[in-house]
Image (spheres, rainbow, N blue to C red):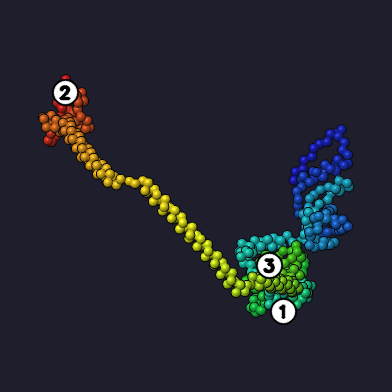
Amino acid sequence: MNLSFQPIGFQSVLSVTELNRSARELLEHALPLLWVSGEISNLKQYHSGHWYFSLKDTNAQVRCVMFHHKNQYLNWQPKEGMQVEVHALVTLYEARGEFQLNVENIRRAGLGLLYEAFERLKAKLEHAGLFHPTHKKALPTFPRQIGIITSLNTAALHDVLTTLQRRMPALPVIIYPAPVQGEGAAAKIAAAIHLAIKRMECDVLILCRGGGSIEDLWAFNEEIVARAIYACSIPIVTGIGHETDFTIADFVADVRAPTPTGAAQIASPNAQEISNHLRHLGQRMQHAIQRSIERRMQMTDLLTHRLQHPGDRIYHQAKHLHHLQERLLNAYLRYRETLCWKLNELNRRMHTSSPDIPFLFKQQHDMALRLRRAGIHHIQMLENNLQRQQAHLVHLNPQAVLARGYSITYTTDGHIVHNWQQIHAMDDIRITFAKGWAQAKVTETGK
């Protein structure tokens, strides 16, 4: 690493504040965020939530600070003498001129390998399709029996049983005991899942354990457990660790709960909520029936009010029929009077006109004779005109001219030859006669 310093002239004098600020800026720009391993020493935790400690090895030590907004997300508690790895920014505390590390993240030594193994297995199983939503099974709304896979001597089992007892006391529970940490725990968890599949006595399984470090939860990051969950035909709800803890089993399971208690709440219906819902439905049904009865009572009152004695109804209908009969008779009389008036008017107009029928017949006969004579005359004129036109056509017919000994000469491209300039010696020409034609060659032209 190459650190360059600007020379300070003999006359340049820096204050301590300026010196420390320049040193801090130089360190922060020259050294990026880096991981440093060592042993925790002189750990102090203040009421503000900030942590102050030293990180040391056999030959040296460095002061460290981790502020509250950084350490509040850790799910474990650092202790004196613990081997850790910190991700920190190298800086200088200006007020005291002390070299220190501002810690961004901290993990126990060796956890880097576990995280790498976790990410590799996660990527492998995700690529194999074990996390795909299409493989997730829906949880039953009203399970007949719930299975729990966990250790018998854990607080997580007590929390799950307490929650199930509170939510649905009559729901049967079967426990499939299995160690949740330590050597061989993953194989035994997978065996418990296979046993539950074989017996098929539960509608949903809860896989749970309490909080702990990543080493404590590592059994749930094993591939054998992930494969067993994926192959399980019974829906599985995981409640492993705290809300911030994520394991491979959570990604494969059908539903992940933040805690064991949350898993019990997700897997079981709430008897009190069901009772309240049924009571609410009963009240709604009772109100609906009551409103229906009231509507029918009101309709009965309306129909009773509209009900009429048959005799009264017949009387009113007979009265209405008599009224219609009178209207029909009056309408007929008015119509007959109108027709009589129109007939009298037509008779009067006919007598007033008095047409001369014999005269009209004679006039019609004379007009027919005139029309026939005019038609004959027009046809004769048309025939005479046609004959004149035919004579003109015969006179102008080129064929008649050819019949008198004349001929028509054409060039090879079909044009009629009118003078000697249109053709030249050795040109081919075509001569048409009144009857037939001849092909010839020009030997000489001239005026």
Q: Residue at x 86, y 40 (%)?
A: 18
Judging by the rendered image, the residue that carries numbered circle 3 is: 255
Q: CA distance from mark 2 to mark 1?
A: 132 Å
* Disc 1 residue crowd, few under 14, some 14–19, many 20+, Cα 10 Å: some
Task: For mark 2, give the secondary structure.
Answer: loop
Give coordinates of residue 440: x percent, y percent. Answer: 14, 31
- Identify the amino acid type marked 2: Thr
- Identify the amino acid type marked 3: Val
Q: Which mark's residue is nearer the viewer, 2 or 3?
A: 2
Q: Which mark's residue is nearer the viewer, 3 or 1?
A: 1
- Up the image or down, 221 lies above or below 27; here it is below
Judging by the rendered image, the residue that carries numbered circle 1 is: 172
- In the image shown, does 443 or 27 lie closer to the viewer? 443
Judging by the rendered image, the residue that carries numbered circle 2 is: 445
Q: Quadrant of residue 264?
A: bottom right
Q: Which of the marked residues, 2 or 1, is nearer the chain's N terminus?
A: 1
Q: Which mark's residue is nearer the viewer, 2 or 1?
A: 2
Give coordinates of residue 272: x percent, y percent. Answer: 76, 73
